[in-house]
Image (cartoon, helix red, strand yellow):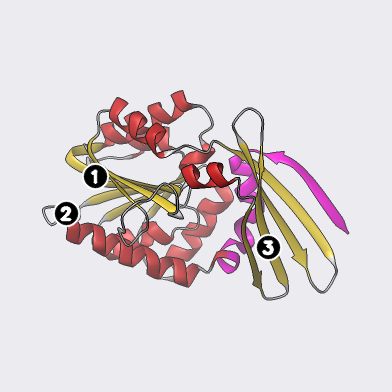
Amino acid sequence: MNRLSETLSPADFYDALAAGYDAMTGFVQRTARAERFVADLLARHGEMVPRAAADVGCGTGAYTLALGRAGFDALGLDPSPEMVQQARRNAARLKQDARFVQAGLAEVDGETNQPLDLVVCMGNTVPHILDPADLRDGFAAAHAALRAGGILAVQTLNYDHILADRERIVSIDTEGNESFVRFYDFLPDGLVHFNLLRFGHAAGEHTLTSVLLHPYRQAELVAALEHAGFWQIAAYGSLDFAPFDPASSETLLLVAER
């Protein structure tokens, strides 16, 4: 059977993926990458004492759990209730204490019970916020949640490069008996459809699910961060803190200080 879905909300899109998300994206590898990133970030900000942190768009909890292992009291937020449940199962399986709530970036200041040292928003979470005014509100909420001198780290794909080259194919992967093709449709209004096409090898069926994204460029994100009151905004081209090249970097990592 072949199934074609209509465009879903971010919560519904990730609800549909939650059960197989860790297998599809490699939870063990993502967690190891998250641990390296958190360790490198702490090394770069040696004055930061690991006390409290939030992971916005936490998905199944890889970065939240990495923050916990680094010594933070870690909070994970995600608009998808199924992702939140999977993150809680991962924490229980790994015998880690972490709190997970169904919420987004704009709610981060209301979900914390202490000033945060660090807020991370990883894995292309921000482009799901379609309205730039909502993005500014989200960054303002992160600013309010952080202590003075606290850090916000935001990772997206490098849409300067993607929009310039009109790259449609994001990735093609196989896990077990299923293959996954991630690709874009570029829309006239400047938004993009992010599509996930899944092929089941044994049954010969496929499923297509889609969600809208706002492909924020570096300058737009920096302006929104400055509008929220952040400064000392540094741009990198990888989670290893390589220099950012708008024409060629795969990812954009922005690290800003409150």
Residue 26 marker: none
Q: Nearer the viewer, residue 55 or 201?
A: 201
Residue named by callout 3: 180
Q: Is residue 189 above or below residue 114?
A: above
Tag 1–tag 2 contact (CB < 8 Å):
yes
Q: Is residue 144 above or below residue 178?
A: above
Determine the residue positioned at 20% across, 52% down: 51
- State the CA–CA distance, disc 3 to disc 1: 35 Å
Q: Position of residue 111 (x, y in %)?
A: 36, 38
- State the CA–CA distance, disc 1 to disc 2: 9 Å
Determine the residue positioned at 63% across, 27% down: 189
- State the CA–CA distance, disc 3 to disc 2: 38 Å
Name the secondary structure under disc 2.
Answer: loop
Would you say 17 lies left or right of 241 here? right
Q: Name the amino acid, label 3.
A: Phe
Q: Name the amino acid, label 1.
A: Ile
Residue named by callout 2: 45
Tag 3–tag 2 contact (CB < 8 Å):
no
Q: Is residue 146 above or below residue 238?
A: above
Would you say 154 lies left or right of 151 here? right
Dot 2: within a 10 Å radius of its alpha carbon, few (fewer than 14), some, or many (20 or more) residues?
A: few
- Taking the magenta stretch, the answer to whether it contains residue 18 is yes
Name the secondary structure under disc 1.
Answer: strand
